[in-house]
Amino acid sequence: MASEKAVPMNEAVTRGDAAGIRSATGRLLSWFLRAMGGVAVRCELWNGDVVEGGQGEPVATVKVKDATTLLRVVYDSELEFGEAYSDGRIEVTGDLVGLMEAIYRAPAHPLAARFLRRGLKRSANTHARSRDNVHRHYDLGNEFYRLWLDREMLYTCAYFPTPGASLEEAQIAKMEHVCRKVDLRPGDRVVEAGCGWGSLALYMARVKGATVRAFNISKEQIAYARERARREGLEGRVEFVEDDYRNVRGRYDVFMSVGMLEHVGPENYRELGRVIDSSLEAHGRGLIHTIGRNRPEALNAWIAKRIFPGAYPPTLREMMEIFEPVNLSVLDVENLRLHYASTARHWLDRYLAHVGEVRRMFDERFARAWELYLSGTVAAFTSATLELFQVAFARAMHNEMPWTRAHLYES
């Protein structure tokens, strides 16, 4: 009969069967926790085996319900943990965000890294594939996103002027922040690539006096944005275009992109640069706001498969493929990583408050998947697995930008 005594991982590995330590699957789990870098977690198997990894108090308890699930997670943890959690074949009690943080922070053994972080091979984001990828994520229904986003329906990193600011306050502050970074002025003509539900485009028109042409390939979002522009009487100032950024035409004073570059793919960065170059006037300037990384790495395999197909978070070096070939000057780079961690925490709290409605809209598997995704998002930014870059740029000979950064913080 399997022992139910919890044995610390380092003891389990050295004492083995001589200590009456459980089954082969229990020993496999012990090895796996060590390979992960000693995450402080308590694991319970279907057969009664209990294994504790790492040092100190476990951050959570993970219950694995069958042998097939354990083998799949050991073989391809990035993909299979998310699949098993969504299905309910893995249950987590305790701090799910803390567990994800511990996993992201753990120094995995190099020999095990290819099992723990395999990634998925990305396909190039063609016009058709980009539209399909966007449809699978953003066209889940406006009512779903309305449950847990702010009133403006902004699904990008907020900017918290103080740690205690509300999500609503922080999202408005973000829109003001990016407008100031491009020195947006009344009468400016703006092209926005990837406009979400239209809040930033409407803000630039209503508050800053700009004329905006905003591109997006999500049918749900474009329909929402157009209706909101009609209600607010801004149809003559903001045009929402259901089309790909590669089809942007015309000349503009400002190029703005907040939360789209993740869906472009590095194979298309030079083309994006050419689009910006052909769009901007001689005095043109712009901003790209994107999730990124400190070093090149594929998106988490499960997120790429189930949540954000086709996405890729770039490094700053990779982003230079947008600017360098067309001689655009980078003026300012800001990393808002901890602002995104706070944003995602707000989203997660609101999501969990409405998770029953999510189950009724979709099903239990969907609800669990998005709980894991949002929890993992918080953890990814607190652990610096992901970054949030804002890169402001301008034509090389544009000499009229503000002399200091004081304009960003004036009341």
Image: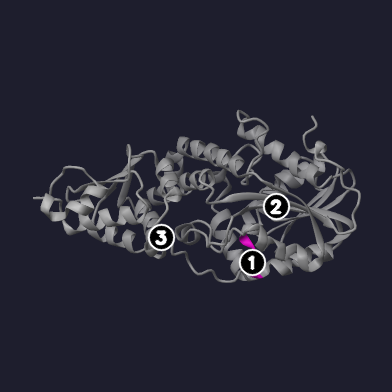
194 within the magenta span:
no
Q: Secondary structure at mark 1?
A: helix
On the image, the x and y values in percent for residue 6 come to 20, 43
On the image, the x and y values in percent for residue 382 come to 52, 43
Q: Hey, what amino acid is under mark 2?
A: Cys
**Residue 340 seen anywhere in this rendered image of the structure:** yes
- What is the span of residues highlighted in magenta in the rendered image? 263-267
Give the residue number, with chain letter if any, for mark 1.
266
Q: Measure the C-alpha gap from mark 1 to mark 2.
A: 20 Å
Residue located 76% across and 62% down the image: 323
First in residue order: circle 2 vs circle 3: 3
264 within the magenta span:
yes
Give the residue number, with chain letter if any, for mark 2.
195
Q: Hey, what amino acid is under mark 3?
A: Leu
Give the residue number, with chain letter if any, for mark 3.
79
On the image, the x and y values in percent for residue 213 come to 79, 54
In this picture, is 113 found above or below 337? below
Q: Secondary structure at mark 2?
A: loop
